Image (cartoon, helix red, strand yellow):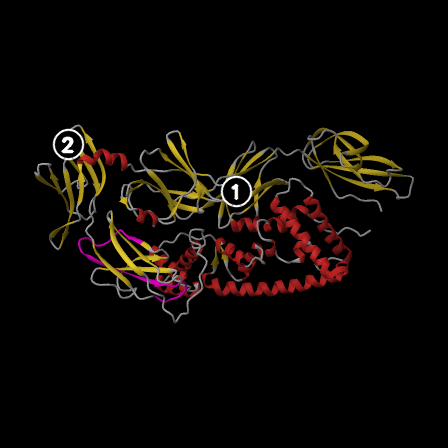
Amino acid sequence: MTAPPHEPFDPAGYDDRVVKPLRGRQSSGYPDELAERYAISADLPDDQLLHRVEEVRAHWAAMLRRLSLPVSMQRVYRAFQAADRDLAAEHGDELANAEWWRARLVDQEQERRTATGRLVTLLREAYGPLAAITPAVLTELHLAYPEFTPGALAAAAGEAGLVVTEPEPPDDRAIAERIRHALNAGMPARLLLRQVTEQLDDPEAASRLVLAVLDERLTPEWRPAPAKPAVAATTAPVAARSLTARLTGLDVMLSWAPGDEEAGRYLLVRNVDHEPRTIDDGEVVYDGPDTRAVDRDAPIAREVWYAVFAGVRDADAWSAPCATSIEVLPPVVLRDAKPAGHRLRMSWRVQPRAVAVRIVRIRPDGDRHETILRENLDTFDDEFVPESPSWYEIRPVYEVDGAEVPGEVFRYASSDTQLFQQHNRILELALESATIEHTPRVQASWPLQSGHDVRVRFSATPCPWQPGDRISAAELNGFGTELRGERVPRGATTVLTGDVAPGRLTYVAFAAHGDEIVVGHPVSFTALTPVADLGAERRGGEILVSWIWPEGIPEVSVRWSGPDGSDELTLSRHDYDVHGCRIRYGTSSIEIEVRAMTRAPGPEPGFSLPATTRLPARLPRLGYSVQLRGAPWSRTRKAVVTLTALDRIEPCELLVGVSRQADDLEVLLRFFVTLDKDATEDRVLELTAPHRNAELVCVPAIPGTVTVIAQPLDKPR
């Protein structure tokens, strides 16, 4: 019989190191490294190498027989078995030759060293000037180079002279914004660092700033969309079409049609003197992929020119301008109109640069009365006669070069007050996560509205309107994505549940009545896919927690509680990949909760629904080993059962016997034992035919009183 290897196969360590990191990945992306998959090395003697291969195969089969094994781990083991069958079909009897395995191991090790050297060179060239790299960048590199384990990537970074460190928030927003644009345009980080260093005259500060922006772009909200085929650098993009500008509330809303489907970027430029001719001819209002933008800071009471330029992702080429102009004279935006007895109180939003508001009241008999507000420009109180409604013409007044210029007029009839109150309610959503498995979902609710068609939309960009603004259906359809699902009345509210994009988004409820749509209060909410296949197992004085990470999630929050204490930690994907998640905890029961989290954008982190698991209290552990004394052919042999207390053992009854099949023990010895931690005790029994060469086992007489662990057995030859 082949002797077992000097270093016993560690099934738990194998699962942690080899199997669990592959959960959730396609089998086609598994590394083809025999050393890792079969837990072997070229320096093992022939018999031990072949024995280890058989041990690992047996471990795969044993794990697949476990009914409680997570599906994700089953897939990995089955993929290993399929690859093993393919190997046998291709090489046949060669697999029984240790030299074949050793030659393959040597070849793969040489390939690995060559690939690692190239990786070190790549990291040194790409990030060497920064002298550092972040965990988020390493995680992204692992996705780009899955043949390298996270630990191997971290080691290569160290060999390249890089320190793995968390980034500091950018302290110079203007320069950080320029770095973002330059990175989006494809400029290498090392060249950017040179320019930023010259500008700041501080190499360390420049390195921190570039590193922070590099890291920031790898969060889900900054992750770039899949690149489209590049247009030849010599070909200018096709210009956008039909640029329009109109006043929406107090702001200028601009929209345009793409002229070329390859355009992945648009630059909107504003100029107060003439039509912008180039991207540098004026102030940049918008830079991004959308075909609409809002200018909240347009110059007042003058004609303003806008031009949009189409660009191509990762190319420094811009189209000819598509231009338009608009005279910016914003009206007031009515917020509320409330009758109180014989008084009518109106309030509105007015452009902050207005110097006055002119109000003309027109009675049914034609009588006109003008009021000019120079203070408290956003409220007006007037007498109210329901039987004799009045018309109001309300204009803000702006000052340009010492002269007053009236803004656009807003007209309102006091007879519309009741209708206005009914149909101008500003809705605010209540949001809850309703994520199911791998699909982010949101449950939105709002007060029941009679006569309203309420629509909920979500977007990664802020809402371009203020609460209470009234917009058209065309404007609404240009904002974000509709939340679709079944609407269910629940008490005094309506509940709508639907699928959404992952991450932190802006949600807004819009109340429509006829052609008018009233903008609700924007609500920022994070919907994330929770972690999957959460599991936990005890390893000595630690608890090893594992899970499958959702796509694009950089961090998780881990919380635990139980009689032995409670605590929490935040763990990055990089630290999990390299070190795992280990909790120091006692032997009592424990509840563990893991939530996916993201920190950008917004001041507070967002969390997914929690995944939870529970470990019962750990039973005291008792190890045992059996040594058989005497020749196998002798009529009697002695069996020495050595007990080792891994924890303190209170009085308990044990059985030693021969297991013929599952749950069928032929008892040869029954006894009680009490041991302090780390204490040992021997029990001796004589074996006669037919038991003298049998393999003995030790079990508790009453299940659930102690955990008995078999230590290496000295099997009879």
Front residue of 302/95: it is 302
- x then y, percent, for residue 396: 16, 46
Is 284 placed above or below 397 here? below
Mark 1 surroundings: few (<14), some (14-19) or many (≥20) residues within 10 A: few
The image's mark for residue 427 is none
Residue 265 in sight from this viewpoint: yes
Distance, label 1 to label 2, CA atoms, is: 58 Å
Q: For mark 2, what is the residue?
A: 384
Label 1: which residue?
A: 437
Q: Position of residue 486 (x, y in %)?
A: 43, 38
Looking at marks 1 and 2 on the same chain, the residue that comes earlier in the sequence is marked by 2
The three-letter code of the residue at mark 2 reads Phe
Name the residue at 57% across, 65% down: 117
Q: Could you say where residue 148 lies in the image, as x and y percent from the top left?
A: 58, 58
- Nearest to the eye among marks 1 and 2: give it: 2
Could you tell whether 606 is left or right of 678 in the image?
left
Identify the residue at the far right of this view: 635
**Measuring 31% from the left and 35% from the top, which residue is drawn there?**
451
The span shown in magenta is 293-318
Pick the front one: 515 or 390: 515
Magenta span contains residue 323: no
- Tell me if mark 2 has few (under 14), some (14-19) or many (20+) residues whose alpha carbon lies within 10 angstroms of its own: some
Tell me the kind of residue under disc 1.
Answer: Glu
Q: Is residue 297 magenta?
A: yes
Residue displayed at 36% across by 53% down: 171
Secondary structure found at label 1: loop
Residue positioned 32% across, 54% down in the render: 292
Q: Whole-percent x and y of residue 324? A: 25, 60
Left/right placement of residue 545 relative to residue 315 reads: right
Residue 97, can we see it?
Answer: no
